[in-house]
Amino acid sequence: QLTFSQKVRMTTGVNIISLLSATVGLAIGMNGESLGLYTATGSSAATWGAVTGKQPLTWYKTTFDAPEGNDPLALDMGSMGKGIMWINGQSIGRYWPANLARGECEQCTYAGMFTETKCLSNCDQPSQRWYYVPRSWLIPTGNLLVVLEEWGGDPTAISLAKRTV
């Protein structure tokens, strides 16, 4: 949760408010995109610090080796809040596992009229936590994973899973 406690000047019409925070090793949170922190060159130019707990608007990076084989791969982002992730400069996309499915998960019958709340499943679970990683984006060793966390998740629990089919 972010709290801003200074005066804000509002004018007639549309007012755009940008909230920025400190990041690991950088002065301004959103500055990382313009610096290209999600690329090997950009991440090498920045000074990175240690992970210090759950911090909002924080950039994280790590390297990993590609698992052997040709099985499909996915990032498990279940420990994170909301943000964006890149592998080797390629955007995997936005994640938001902190957004939980809500409703009443009771025994289901499909008889009768359909409604949007009928036969809900996985209540109080993330709507998505697994994110596909194309093997063509990986190199054998030293793959770069960069994450911009907006809400303050736990990056130490991110994992790469291999699905054996």
Image (cartoon, helix red, strand yellow):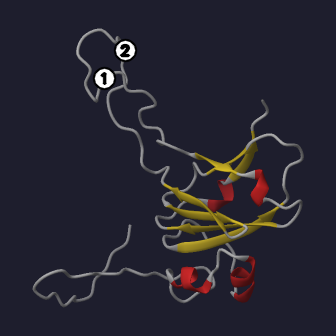
Instruction: Indicate the secondary structure of the residue bearing disc 1.
Output: loop
Q: Which residue is mark 2?
A: 108
The residue under the point 37% across, 80% down is 19
Name the residue located 16 percent from the left edge and 87 percent from the top edge: 10
- Estimate the x, y position of residue 4 in percent, counting from the top left: 31, 80
Residue at image mark 1: 118
Viewed as shown, does residue 71 lie left or right of 111? right
Residue furthest to the front = 136
Image x and y of residue 36, in percent: 63, 81
As rendered, which of 50 and 76 lies closer to the eye? Answer: 76
Q: Is residue 138 left or right of residue 155?
A: right
In the picture shown, does residue 152 fall above or below 72? below
Dot 1 or dot 2: first in sequence order is 2
Q: Residue 121: percent from the left, percent from the top?
A: 43, 27
Q: Is residue 122 left or right of residue 37?
A: left
User: Is the C-beta separation of discs 1 and 2 under 8 Å?
Assistant: yes
Pick the front one: 112 or 49? 112
Q: Residues within 10 Å of mark 1 (few under 14, many from 20)?
A: some
Query: In the rendered structure, which amino acid carries the disc numbered 2?
Result: Cys
| Residue at mark 1 to residue at mark 2: CA–CA distance | 8 Å
